[in-house]
Amino acid sequence: MSRASLAKDPSHVSEMFDEVAPRYDCTNDILSMGQARLWRRAVTRAVAPRPGLRVLDLGAGTGTSSEPLADAGADVVPADFSEGMLAEGRRRRPDLPFTRADAMDLPFEDASFDVVTISFALRNVADPAVALREMARVTRPGGRLVLCEFSTPTLAPFRAVYERYLMKALPAIAGRVSSNPESYEYLAESIEAWPAQAGVRDLVVGSGWTDVRWRNLSGGVVALHTAQRADVPALARY
Ligand SMILES: C[S@@+](CC[C@H](N)C(=O)[O-])C[C@H]1O[C@@H](n2cnc3c(N)ncnc32)[C@H](O)[C@@H]1O
């Protein structure tokens, strides 16, 4: 069993997700106490899928974040760099065009999507600013970003309870239900180390996006950031 470190070496991160893949969705439902379904509904509303909308779901994993978008008629490309997660996704949804892609070097043409969305994945990327710039490059000018990630609860008493859950209870529960329990220690540590809402906004603004807004979900356990692709000529590939 392997777990990544906060250095987020891409080969360690992808290997860790390969091992998580078989029980990924079930473990999520248990650890989030059902909240994950609410977060996905918020992402879907923000993407506003409709027939013909070209959507890249980056870090799509098993495709759980892509399914509601595809089911609403959008042309969704679920992309991920873990072969294990992609294999699980292809088995479950053979109709979706699962694509192997590294967020820091996307295999897509400039301006080829109307919306790029990323759920619970940017935190795992070694250099999130590079990934955000790549996402801007493949989005058409005026196109949108929908970024869903764990964040920082806004009320201090709730934050204290949540941090205890994250660092103590979550790894213990994951030990019983996950196919790679060690990876849930990484999950807790990486959430702790991830910038709060305003820090993520600053990261997005500096990476080819404008009009960045966010809303908190579940009291700030999760934040949903949206932005528009800055209206500048083609962004160079990193
Ligand atoms: C926690 S899962 C989220 C999956 C899905 N978006 C969801 O909401 O359930 C994170 C995913 O991000 C992928 N990932 C992490 N770093 C990546 C990178 N640099 N390029 C592509 N995928 C990456 C992992 O392989 C994993 O499948």
Image: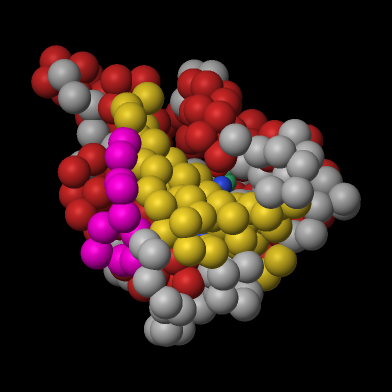
Residue 98 is left or right of residue 231, and the answer is: right
What is the magenta range? 205-214
Residue at screen point 54% across, 64% down: 140
Please identify the quadrant where the C terminus is shown: bottom left
Residue at screen point 37% across, 25% down: 217
Residue at screen point 21% across, 17% down: 158
Image coords of residue 33 (percent x, y): 49, 19
Residue 221 is left or right of residue 131, and the answer is: left
Image coords of residue 183 (percent x, y): 45, 50
Compared to 51, does 40 lie above or below?
A: above
Compared to 87, does 63 lie above or below?
A: above
Image coords of residue 192 (percent x, y): 24, 44
Residue at screen point 64% across, 32% down: 26
Compared to 26, does 98 lie above or below?
A: below
Give the prevailing secondary structure in the magenta stretch: strand
Residue 104 is left or right of residue 82, and the answer is: left
Q: Nearer the viewer, residue 220 or 232?
A: 232
Is 210 in the magenta? yes
Query: Looking at the image, which residue sits at the far right?
Result: 95
Image coords of residue 63 (percent x, y): 68, 47
